[in-house]
Image (tube, rainbow, N blue to C red):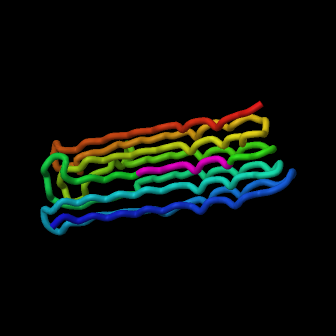
Amino acid sequence: APESGSGPAAGGNGGTGRGAGNRGGDGGVASNTMASAISTGDGRADATAVQTGGSGGSGTAGADGGDGANSTLTDAVSVSTSQSQTNVNNAWQRAVGGAGGDSAGGMAGQAGDAVSTLGSALNPFSNAGGGSVDAHAEADGGAGGSISSGSTGSGTNGGDATATVIAGDNGNGNPDVQATANADGSLGGIGRG
C-alpha cells in the first residue's frame, strides 16, 4: 500500500506596531520540520516537508514594519521502499521565507531568506529501501516590505533563495534516481515618494 508522510510548519506572524519609534513584530521562526515515509514492502513512498517563516508585522502611524523570518531546511525528508518504478517515490522539501512588514510613515521590514538543502557530496540523499526516488528541494524568498499609500519611503528587497539537491542510488546500482532543485527570489516591496 502507498505510504505518505507530510510535515508542514509555519512561524507565527508579527503583530502590528503603531507610532514613530516603534515597529511591527518580527515573524516567528519555524524549525525542526521533518517528514518520513516507509513502506515495508514495495509500495509507493512519498514524503513532503514545507516550512514557512512568519511574516513581519505592519507598522502604522510612523512605526517600522517587522522583519520576515528566515527559513532553512536541511535533509528534512526521507523515504524507504523497495519500489523501483520511475517517477513513483517522491521526497520533496520546500523552505519559504517570511514577508517583510509594510509601513505607513516608517521603514518597511526586511524579507526572510530561504535555504533548502537535500543531501551532500559526502552523504547523498537516497531511498533507504533501495528503490527509486525523485528528490526535490525548493526555496522561495519572502516578499519585501512596502510603503503604504500616502507615505514616502523605500520598499525593501525580496528575500534570497538557495536550493541544493545531491542524490545517489544507495550503492545498489539502481539507475532511477532523479534530483531537482528550484530557487526563487521574491519581489521587492513598493517604494513611494
Picture coordinates of residue 3 (x, y %)?
23, 65
Toward the viewer: 118 or 114? 114
Quadrant position of the C terminus in the picture: top right
Which residue reaches farthest top? 193
Q: Is residue 98 magenta?
A: yes
Give the total of numbered labels.
0
Q: Is residue 150 magenta?
A: no
Residue, x 48% and y 56% (percent of image)?
51
Toward the viewer: 113 or 39? 113
Residue, x 32% and y 64% (percent of image)?
5
Left or right: where 166 falls relative to 101:
left
Give the vertical position of 41 relative to 70 (above or below). Answer: below
Picture coordinates of residue 109 (x, y %)?
70, 46
Left or right: where 42 falls relative to 153:
left
Quadrant position of the N terminus in the picture: bottom left
Picture coordinates of residue 15 (x, y %)?
69, 61
Q: Main secondary structure of the magenta part?
A: loop
Give the vertical position of 153 relative to 41 (above or below). Answer: above
Report the span colored magenta. Answer: 94-101
Quadrant of the rendered image containing residue 39: bottom left
Picture coordinates of residue 150 (x, y %)?
77, 39
Residue, x 13% and y 62% (percent of image)?
42
Give the vertical position of 39 relative to 54 (above or below). Answer: below
Toward the viewer: 57 or 51? 57
Which residue reaches farthest front? 150
Residue, x 61% and y 36% (percent of image)?
188
